[in-house]
Image (cartoon, rainbow, N blue to C red):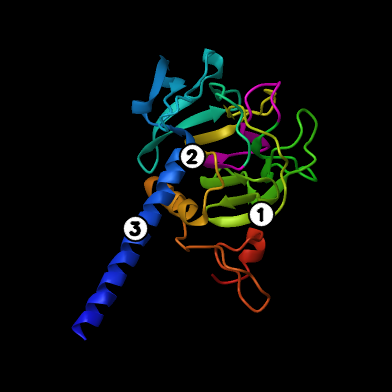
Amino acid sequence: MKEGLCVVLWTLRQALKHQLRTGTDKWEAVAAANVLWLQAEAAHTASVKQGNDQQVRRVHDLSGRGNWASSQLASRMPILRPNLLNGHAAFEFEGSSVLKTRPFSKPLQQPITLVIVGRARGDTTMVDSLTPQSARFELCHGYPSGWHPSPEICMTASGHDSSPRQSMRGSTRSMGDWHIYTAIYDQKRSQIFVDGYCEGSAKSVGANELDGLSIGCDHNGVFFLTGSVAEIRLYHCHLPAEQRVQTEAALAHRYGLTYSSAPAPPAYTPSRPLARFGCAPRSLRASHHD
């Protein structure tokens, strides 16, 4: 009896060690995949004073990869706004500002996960690839099927100059509200989440690579962001659901945003109400109870 109990306890200890080791390994893999991490805090930025404003000249990359972002022209520098979101600062883009990362050492192939804490108004680009010579890699509120003053969120890694042939749209519109946007570029396994809601999945958005980021403007310098960005994280992987949820939840806690801690997207059937993580337009979800 005693010997059997010892065996059970030893088995449980080994299982716990394996679980802890596996969880640690997953987060180590996520950390290794983090190629860019920008945060709008004075300690991580170099700025110049212009009147009453602090214009952002350079932002340090917290990932340790050296992919800092900068703006060389005073007329293109966003403004660092302190205490803008739950006591934290944010970069304000007024429709003509842009930050550009240094070119990545080599273009990143998909899968790529982009996480942004930001807000936008109107037909506007949040981020895109680096230069006019780059292939498009865009997260925006735009490319509407019919004109709307506040287009839905859209992600695409398709084409170059003309409208993309492949893209995926969500249902969140650019009304100036703060959101946590997560766009996973993984060809036919692409997904888009806003505040934890899955707003699109299982559709190809194109196969373009990413050579660097333009923040606050499209790669052609035409569509500028009117809005703000508090934080950006870029991962060279398809961020696993568990790590994605925990990352988004931590950002929601930091910035005082609403978020659900549901562990995974449940399947939707007509007999089962849509849960918070169900992939469907918000208008449809609003008619169901979580």
In-front residue for pair 84/253: 253
Question: Of callouts 1 and 3, which one flags the residue occurring earlier in the amino acid sequence?
Answer: 3
Q: Is residue 90 magenta?
A: no
Q: Of tags 2 and 1, which is closer to the observer? A: 2
Q: Identify whether 251 is placed above or below 7.
A: above
**In the drawing, what numbered circle is on residue 20?**
3
Q: Amino acid at mark 2?
A: Ala
The residue beneath circle 2 is 33
The residue beneath circle 1 is 200
Please give left or right for residue 88 compared with residue 170 in the image. Answer: left
The part of the image, by quadrant, that contains residue 174 is: top right
Confirm whether residue 75 shows in the render: yes
Please give left or right for residue 231 compared with residue 170 in the image. Answer: left
Q: How many marks?
A: 3
Question: Of callouts 2 and 1, which one flags the residue occurring earlier in the amino acid sequence?
Answer: 2
Q: Residue furthest front?
A: 3
Tell me where residue 171 appears, x and y as whole percent: 66, 53
